[in-house]
Image: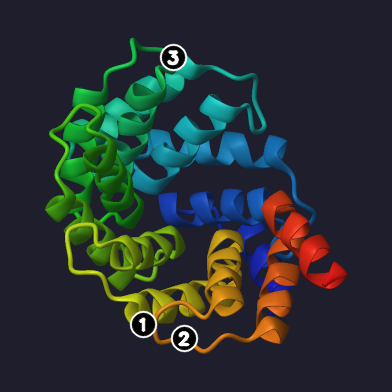
Amino acid sequence: MNSKEIYNWLLYNQNDPDSIFLLGYFNYNGIGTTEDEAKAFPLFSHASELGHILAQYYVGMCCQFGYGITKNRKRAFEYYEKLANENYAIGQFSLGCLYEKGINVRKDFKIAAYLYEKAANNGHLVAMYNLGRLHFIGDGVDENHQKVFELYKRSAEGEYLDGILMLGYCYYFGIGIGIDRLEAFKLYQKAANLGHMTAQYNLASMYEIGDGRIEKDIGKAIYWYEQSANQGNKNAQNKLEILKKN
């Protein structure tokens, strides 16, 4: 069956919370049909009322950002809080984001860090990254470079792109670990190959100056600056202008 056939089957088989949620998900993402958030939301809401956990998250997200419904951050907060209290990582993470940004609640980095830690312990990769970021700057938690390294490493091991980038950053500058420019290069290369704009810029910079054990290669530097610039990185665009003049 192709995606259109699955969509049509779901239309006539709304027998349980999973199928109701999936029909909403197909409408939300335009799978087998035209993307339609307004059709997706009531399906998410129905599945949510029947106890579907992921549907409850999607209702919260739609309310937070106004997808298919008028924006309602208070309702989003309530949905995330319910999920967090039931020990679901996605709720803990999402609620942590609201506390960190002060959305529908007083900004509180300490509570945000607490929620990120709970979500990280439940395997949420972005929560690991966010908690590492808070430990790096000392917001809501002690500044602790060893924890920064450990959290970015866990996030990177789960293939989270920003985690891979920042683990490379740790190796490059010796944050929580000894300086290892070659390991930084490998991590930047991995993230760059996967399309990370900042990793592409950092990789280009290493090629430009021949950093550490990396052989200088202006051609490769230009290539990676171009990849980064094509994604809108102004610094990469400026670097290209300078290199191409020379």
Residue shown at 17%/58% (left/top)? 176
Residue shown at 56%/33% (left/top)? 62
Q: Residues within 10 Å of mark 2 (few under 14, many from 20)?
A: some
Residue 89 can be seen, yes or no: yes
When the figure is inspected, residue 30 is found, relative to residue 67, above or below; the finding is: below
From the image, tell me which residue sits under label 3.
74
Question: Contact (CB < 8 A) between labels 3 and 1?
Answer: no
Give the secondary structure at mark 1: helix
Outermost right residue = 245
**Residue 174, image x and y in percent?**
25, 62
Q: Which mark is residue 182?
A: 1
Q: Nearer the viewer, residue 64 or 147?
A: 147
Give the secondary structure at mark 2: loop
Q: Is residue 109 left or right of residue 8?
A: left
Q: Which mark is residue 3?
A: none
Which badge, 3 or 2, comes first in the chain's sequence?
A: 3
Which residue type carries mark 1?
Leu
Spatial CA distance of label 3 from label 1 is 47 Å
Query: In front: mark 3 or mark 2?
Result: 2
From the image, tell me which residue sits under label 2.
214
Which badge, 1 or 2, comes first in the chain's sequence?
A: 1
When the figure is inspected, residue 39 is found, relative to residue 157, above or below; the finding is: above
Residue shown at 32%/64% (left/top)? 167
Question: Contact (CB < 8 A) between labels 1 and 2?
Answer: yes
